[in-house]
Amino acid sequence: MAESAVGSVGAAGRAGAESGQPAIFVTGFCMGGRNAFLSATLGLGLAGVIGFYGWPGGPARNDTPSPTEIVADFDCPVLGIFGGADQGIPVAVVQDFRDALQTARVESEIVVEPDAPHSFFDRKQAEFQAQSDDAWARVRRFIDAHGAA
């Protein structure tokens, strides 16, 4: 992640904590979802991270390790939302991420939306309305559960 983005999130988290403002969550889609997962390792005091179809495993990308490899360093709850028909992220890779989070005792919810492809929520919402509605409800519950100051 770019140093400026990390610095901005860290500054927002500190300012929020000092002023009693709402908790900070990092959310991303695709590569941003992967970065959201990775941000759980940066010591930013996040209330949680939410990744939509962010590649959780495999080789390092952009000089960053895979989230699955470093779940032991996660310091906040994780919500991961994936498509069951995503041709780029096999369900087995998602399951490996879920298993690693459980082994590391990271509070997490990993969801595979049935028959949904990659980008179902941000680019194909009308076509995959039921899955998108479920994903949004899960995001809201996650924030409600972890956002209390």
Image: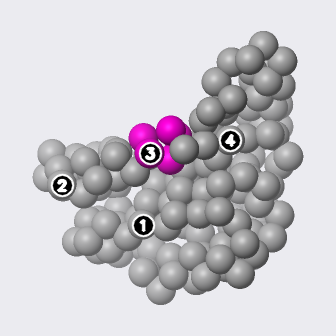
| Residue 68, quarter of picture | bottom right
Residue behind mark 2: 130
Q: Secondary structure at mark 2?
A: helix
Residue behind mark 4: 47
Q: How far is the residue under mark 1 from the one under mark 2?
A: 14 Å
The tag earlier along the polypeptide, 3 or 4, is 4
Mark 1 neighbour density, 10 Å: few (under 14) some (14–19) many (20 or more): many
Residue behind mark 3: 141
Residue at 50% from the left image edge and 47% from the top image edge? 142
Q: Which residue reaches farthest top? A: 19
Q: Which residue reaches farthest bottom? A: 92
The tag earlier along the polypeptide, 2 or 3, is 2
Residue at 61% from the left image edge and 82% from the top image edge? 99
Q: Secondary structure at mark 4?
A: loop
Query: Is 122 situated left or right of 110 in this image?
Result: left
Q: What kind of residue is marked 1? A: Val
CB contact under 8 Å: marks 1 and 2? no
Q: What kind of residue is marked 4? A: Ala
The tag earlier along the polypeptide, 2 or 4, is 4
